[in-house]
Image (spheres, grey):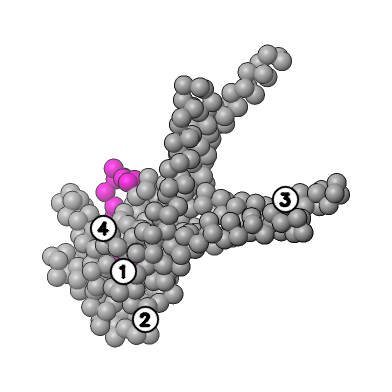
Amino acid sequence: MNNMTGVILENITTVLAIVFALAAAVSTWRDRRRMRNGVFLLLALGFALLSLGRNDDTLWLPVVFALLAILAVPVLGVFLVVNGVVMLRREGRSIANLLSLAVGLLVLLAPFLSGLLARLSGGPEAPIWVSMLPFLLFMLVAYVGFVFCAFLLYSFIYARTTSRKHPDYVIVLGSGLIDGKVPPLLAGRLDKAVQIHRNAPEGSRPVLIPSGGQGPDEPRSEGEAMAEHLLDAGVPSTNVIAETQARTTMENLEFSRALMEKPDPVITVTTSSYHVFRTAMYTRRAGMKAVVRGSKTAAYFVPSAFLREFVAVFLQYKWINFGVCAAIVLGCLALLWESYRWS
């Protein structure tokens, strides 16, 4: 028994990699639309890397990945700053368009802020709590970075999900009009729905439901303009039902489902590529059995859009994420308390 325990402890990273890989497989098999699938998968990959790096012959693996991670910080920061400038030039000034620029500057400045905190904490007269700040900052950033990587990894995987069943209905999510007309971003979602419609067998082609209400700055509803675009693309009017009241993604799904006549329909939802996984999470919340398909998005728009998607998903699980962050803070306070006790 002791020998077996020793073997397990010696190969603990391998055991954990297998456990999390199995957890990812089971969770994904039960429902592909869960954020925890990405978390389990990333943990499995991380422990697998540590397991490979345990042997002398493969010790270079974690070293290489560590160097890549260090080099990725300035590269990522510069990329986000450049993307932020492009977003402002092409899309105009707004809080959403400033997100990429702000995160890029934060990434570039983070090492300098950490160095400043470390220098402050290194002084002989500095209080103990100051020396804890760099570690606390690192732990919080590491957690948020881990969740972001899990989101990015699984978003990429889910976006390549396919279904063998031909849908009965295709919901097209609205995204705003420009002067009452369908802009390129929204046209991509509609064209994806047209593609799905044409690829279906003759006689069983799906009904397309363009969904979107009228915004305060729009002369007509998004659903109406989207339906017009579909008709111009050659979709028969009998296969188009406009939904013109929705103002949020959840309303897009719920109001569109209310227009469906079949009791247990096969549903596909089309949206932009960056919005696929979060939409899939919404379909799960709405109790819909649906597959989400993404349309191509302009390359310059993707980084900023993914950041916005991540923030939305992070806040969607705010109790879990803020709970973990609070646990990190409490852990640091406990370490600080112990250091005061022994000082």
The residue drawn where x is 19% and y is 56% is: 195
Q: Is residue 321 above or below residue 101?
A: above
Mark 1 secondary-structure assignment: helix
**Tag in front: 2 or 3:** 3
From mark 1 to mark 3, how far is it between C-alphas?
41 Å
Nearer to the camera, 14 or 201: 14
Q: Which mark is residue 86?
A: 1
Q: Is residue 312 above or below residue 51?
A: below
Q: What amino acid is labelled 3 in the image? A: Gly
Neighbour class for label 1 at 10 Å: few (<14), some, many (≥20)? some
Q: Amino acid at mark 2?
A: Gly
**Quadrant housing the N terminus:** top right
Distance from the alpha carbon under mark 2 to that under mark 1? 26 Å
Chain part drawn in magenta = 160-173
Secondary structure of the residue carrying tag 2 is loop
Q: Residues within 10 Å of mark 3 (few under 14, many from 20)?
A: few
- The residue to which callout 2 is attached is 215
- The verdict on residue 172 being magenta is yes
Please provide percent x and percent y for residue 77. Answer: 42, 58
Q: Residues within 10 Å of mark 2 (few under 14, many from 20)?
A: some
Residue type at numbered disc 1: Val
Element at badge 3? helix
Q: Nearer the viewer, mark 4 or mark 2?
A: 4
Q: CA distance from mark 4 to mark 2?
A: 24 Å
Which residue position is annotated with label 3? 331
Visible in this render: residue 74? Answer: yes
* Labels 3 & 4 near each other (Cβ < 8 A): no
- Which residue was labeled with disc 4? 296
Q: Earlier in the sequence, mark 3 or mark 4?
A: 4
